[in-house]
């Protein structure tokens, strides 16, 4: 049964500082760069707030976690349970499984495994891992990423966390490279199709090509300068998804100007009919 979800990226101006991970090549270590943002909703309050606004699930970006201590993660899990909300996906926005720097690649894989542990402790069903920054036509990089993702998937399986990836960043920027990658993991790894991450004249067909492998769809419209979505274009993408029998999470993405909840409401009004009539 399909349902409505949101990513915390759609509320990134309301959830306090962004704690972005980066690689320090001089020290060969990960560092955190904080970007200040207003704190309107704490992460612990968000499941209840989203439920009250008619959503059934959330995806949380890793940089929105104010703490990864076990006690905090238990509180977050309890907040989801109290709101009767699904914690679908923990989105790790850092890591390059195709880095030519072997020290960095090994450190990134270790870093991702730590976040798989975190996902397990806070009750996330899935964790989205970036497949890589290499070119989508680099077959050796696809093999390298597939091997790493398969290893991560086996690790996640041992603690009940499904590893998935997305058409996000260069390696999976085309449907062809995405499908090739998934095939090389023997489909042990799931997928997210993001409307905003395919480009060009074949965009609608690419959306359709990866929808059958997708556990969720990131519904990211094209917005004008006032944050108004291109309704006709968005409906054409949603129809393509629907024609492929999609029956999962429609994750609304808003990153335009103005009130972020209002921006999400504009997208929600367009998406809801497709959720209600889903297969």
Image (spheres, rainbow, N blue to C red):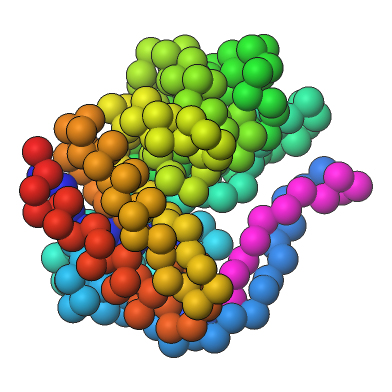
181 to the left or right of 245:
right
Q: Hey, which quadrant is residue 84 in on the image?
A: bottom left
Question: From this viewpoint, is residue 209 visible?
Answer: yes
Residue 25 in magenta?
A: yes
Q: Range of the magenta residues? A: 17-27
- Measured as percent of width and height from the top left, residue 258 is found at 48, 83
34 to the left or right of 176:
right
Residue in view at x 12 percent, y 44 percent: 278
- Measured as percent of width and height from the top left, residue 227 is found at 47, 73
- Measured as percent of width and height from the top left, residue 150 is found at 46, 21
Foreground residue, 205 or 30?
A: 205
165 to the left or right of 20:
left
Q: Hey, which quadrant is residue 158 in on the image?
A: top left
Q: Is residue 80 above or below residue 187?
A: below
Foreground residue, 102 or 96?
A: 96
Q: Hey, which quadrant is residue 145 in on the image?
A: top right
Residue in view at x 54 percent, y 86 percent: 38
Residue in view at x 44 percent, y 20 percent: 179
Quadrant location of the N terminus in the rendered image: top left
Q: Is residue 266 above or below residue 187?
A: below
Residue in view at x 47 percent, y 36 percent: 203
Quadrant location of the C terminus in the rendered image: top left
Main SS of the magenta part reads: strand
- Measured as percent of width and height from the top left, residue 36 is found at 64, 80
Question: From this viewpoint, is residue 164 visible?
Answer: no
Q: How many marks?
A: 0
Residue 235 in magenta?
A: no
188 to the left or right of 101:
left
């Amino acid at each position: 049964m399909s349902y409505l979800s949101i990513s915390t990226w759609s509320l990134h101006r309301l959830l306090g500082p962004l704690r972005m991970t980066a690689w320090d090549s001089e020290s060969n270590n990960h560092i955190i760069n904080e970007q200040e943002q207003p704190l309107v909703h704490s992460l612990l309050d968000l499941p209840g707030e989203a439920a009250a606004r008619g959503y059934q699930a959330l995806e949380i970006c890793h940089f929105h976690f104010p703490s990864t201590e076990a006690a905090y993660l238990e509180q977050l899990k309890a907040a989801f349970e109290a709101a009767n909300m699904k914690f679908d996906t923990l989105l790790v926005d850092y890591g390059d499984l195709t880095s030519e720097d072997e020290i960095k690649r090994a450190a990134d894989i270790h870093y991702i495994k730590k976040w798989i542990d975190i996902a397990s402790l806070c009750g996330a069903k899935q964790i989205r891992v970036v497949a890589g920054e290499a070119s989508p036509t680099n077959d050796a990089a696809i093999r390298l990423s597939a091997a790493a993702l398969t290893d991560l998937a086996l690790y996640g399986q041992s603690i009940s966390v499904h590893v998935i990836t997305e058409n996000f960043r260069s390696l999976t920027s085309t449907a062809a490279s995405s499908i090739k990658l998934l095939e090389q993991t023997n489909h042990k790894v799931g997928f997210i199709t993001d409307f905003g991450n395919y480009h060009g004249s074949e965009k609608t067909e690419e959306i359709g090509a990866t929808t059958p492998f997708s556990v969720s769809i990131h519904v990211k419209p094209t917005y004008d300068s006032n944050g108004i979505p291109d309704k006709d274009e968005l409906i054409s993408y949603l129809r393509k998804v629907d024609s492929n029998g999609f029956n999962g999470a429609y994750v609304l993405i808003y990153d335009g100007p103005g009130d972020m909840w209002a921006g999400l409401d504009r997208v929600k009004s367009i998406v809801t009919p497709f959720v209600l009539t889903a297969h």
